[in-house]
Amino acid sequence: MSLSNSKEVRAPKIKPQYLVVSGAFLIFALLFLQSSRKYSEKPVLKEMDARVQLGISYVQGGGAPMVGIGMLKEVLKEDPENRNAIWTLGTFSQQSGQHDKAIQRFEDLLNIAVNKEERVNAYTALEFSLISTNQVNRALLLHEKMMKEFAGDSTLVSMIQERNKEIKNRFINVQKD
């Protein structure tokens, strides 16, 4: 048998509708496992986190992004301090070029973020959106705030100082011809 005559086998494409149905089934299964408790003492996902994940699936699955955004906003109506939903909406705002909305989301997140990793991520994302909207001075002020907050972490402070120099050189110390 010749290789040129063999048929190429391709995996079937997954339609967005199947992704949504699969996501809904996953959420149902997770909620069922959580309520039954005989399988585990710890819940797999909290109900709000499951709804956030389903919203992300709608946005990233390509089928109905606005349905997913709506689900994330509904989570925030019920739980205004849901850090996962705020972070997700902020990053989706950045991806769609809506940096003003992203700035507000990341500022909101900084008001409630509790651990260092969340705060560093929120500051970094906020700085990106500030730079993207030409709010360079605000980004530099943000660096000062970060250096005070993380003064005990010399490695992080050093990275912030380097980023500060980079921004100043790129946006402020531009040589004129």
Image (tube, helix red, strand yellow):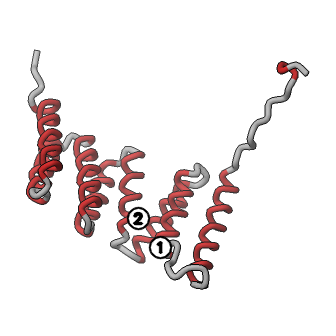
The answer to whether 92 appears left or right of 164 in the picture is: right
Quarter where residue 81 is shown: bottom left
Considering the numbered disc 2 on the image, is that residue within a helix, a strand or a loop? helix
Q: CA distance from mark 1 to mark 2?
A: 9 Å
Residue 119 position, x and y percent, is 24, 60
Q: Nearer the viewer, residue 60 or 66?
A: 60
Q: Is residue 136 above or below residue 27?
A: above
Q: Which residue is mark 1?
A: 48
* C-beta proximity under 8 Å, tags 1 and 2: yes
- Residue type at mark 2 is Ala
Describe the element under mark 1 as helix, strand or loop: helix
Vertical placement of 9 versus 49: above or below?
above
Tell me residue 118's x, y (percent).
29, 60
What's the residue at 44%, 71% (across, down)? 75
Where residue 14 appears, as percent x and y from the top left, is 70, 48
Q: Residue at x 15, y 45 (%)?
A: 160
Q: Is residue 77 left or right of residue 28?
A: left
Q: Which residue is label 2 attached to?
A: 85
